[in-house]
Image (cartoon, rainbow, N blue to C red):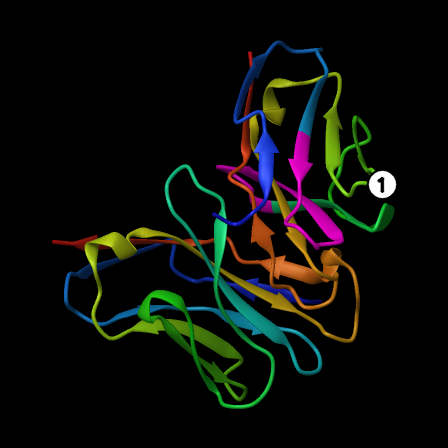
């Protein structure tokens, strides 16, 4: 079965501190991995993706994510959190051997709150 | 701005009624996706169209249907509405159906009373 897990419903971090939002996946083969962010009353916005290559992927707004194949993880990170980073973050995984959106799986989301 | 336009932004209706949600994808995107977001079930994939044809189907109820028109806009029809259908309905688009980088609209919030 293909799935993605975000083990934390809520993450709180102080402004200026580093942040990590966790994501693990289970998919056979080499996955495509994504992070999206949803601000209040908005749609999801693409942040970054891992397809192949360097395990450290840099994305929008200073975010980055590290692909770890042995741990089947794709954690989202930022060195210094901003209050404006407070939002709902979704991890997603796709098996590239299969087409169709029913093979793009979203996690349940992690609400990040950055405390001033 | 993602370039994906959804209308209406808000909709309040009664149980048993039928509504239509509309989506215009980004210019050049051939693939349209519909998702439902509710508090208790997260983001649920409903259906995908590619260049006018159904490409993939997810957890879409039989009371719901969708189509993609020749100009690539899409409509999601929800009928015999129930209280549990209250949710945010998102449309997303992409150039193809392969990568997973989707561009989401801002959603249509449906409230069924």
Q: Is residue A23 left or right of residue B41?
A: left
Q: Who is closer to the viewer here, B46 or B105?
A: B105
Residue B55 location (% of width, % of height): 84, 53
Q: Residue at x 66, y 39 (%)?
A: B24
Residue A111 location (% of width, % of height): 35, 52
Q: Residue at x 70, y 72 (%)?
A: A95
Q: Is residue A63 left or right of residue B53?
A: left
A27 is within the stretch colored magenta: no
Residue B33 location (% of width, % of height): 70, 47
Q: Chain of mark 1?
A: B
In the rendered image, the quadrant that contains the N terminus of chain A is bottom right
Quarter of image, res A20 = bottom left
Q: Is residue A87 left or right of residue A73?
A: left
Q: Residues within 10 Å of mark 1 (few under 14, many from 20)?
A: few
In what element is the residue under mark 1? loop
> Which residue is the extreme one toward the right?
B53
Q: Is residue A39 above or below residue A14?
A: above
- The segment highlighted magenta reads B22-43
Q: Is residue B39 above or below residue B51?
A: above
What count of labels does the image hold? Answer: 1
Q: Who is closer to the viewer here, B13 or B73?
A: B73
Q: Residue at x 71, y 11 (%)?
A: B16
Quarter of image, res B86 = top right
Q: Who is closer to the viewer here, B90 or B74?
A: B74
Q: Residue at x 34, y 73 (%)?
A: A77
Q: Which residue is mark 1?
A: B70
Residue A46 location (% of width, % of height): 50, 60
Quarter of image, res B99 = bottom right
Q: Is residue A51 above or below residue B11?
A: below
């Amino acid at each position: 079965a293909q799935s993605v897990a975000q083990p934390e419903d809520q993450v709180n971090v102080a402004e200026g501190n580093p942040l990590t939002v966790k994501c693990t996946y289970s998919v056979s083969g080499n996955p495509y991995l994504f992070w999206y962010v949803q601000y209040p009353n908005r749609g999801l916005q693409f942040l970054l993706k891992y397809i192949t290559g360097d395990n450290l992927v840099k994305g929008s707004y200073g975010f980055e994510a590290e692909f770890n194949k042995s741990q089947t993880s794709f954690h989202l990170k930022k060195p210094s959190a901003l209050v404006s980073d407070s939002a709902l973050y979704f991890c997603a995984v796709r098996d590239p051997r299969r087409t169709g959106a029913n093979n793009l799986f979203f996690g349940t989301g992690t609400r990040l709150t950055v405390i001033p | 701005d993602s370039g994906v336009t959804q209308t209406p932004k808000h909709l309040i209706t009664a149980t048993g009624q039928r509504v239509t949600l509309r989506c215009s994808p980004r210019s050049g995107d051939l693939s349209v996706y519909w998702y439902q977001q509710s508090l208790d079930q997260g983001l649920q994939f409903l259906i995908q169209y590619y260049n006018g044809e159904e490409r993939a189907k997810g957890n879409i109820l039989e009371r719901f249907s969708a189509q993609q028109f020749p100009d690539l806009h899409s409509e999601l029809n929800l009928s015999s509405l129930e209280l549990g259908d209250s949710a945010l309905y998102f449309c997303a688009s992409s150039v193809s159906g392969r990568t997973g980088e989707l561009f989401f609209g801002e959603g249509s919030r449906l409230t069924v009373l």
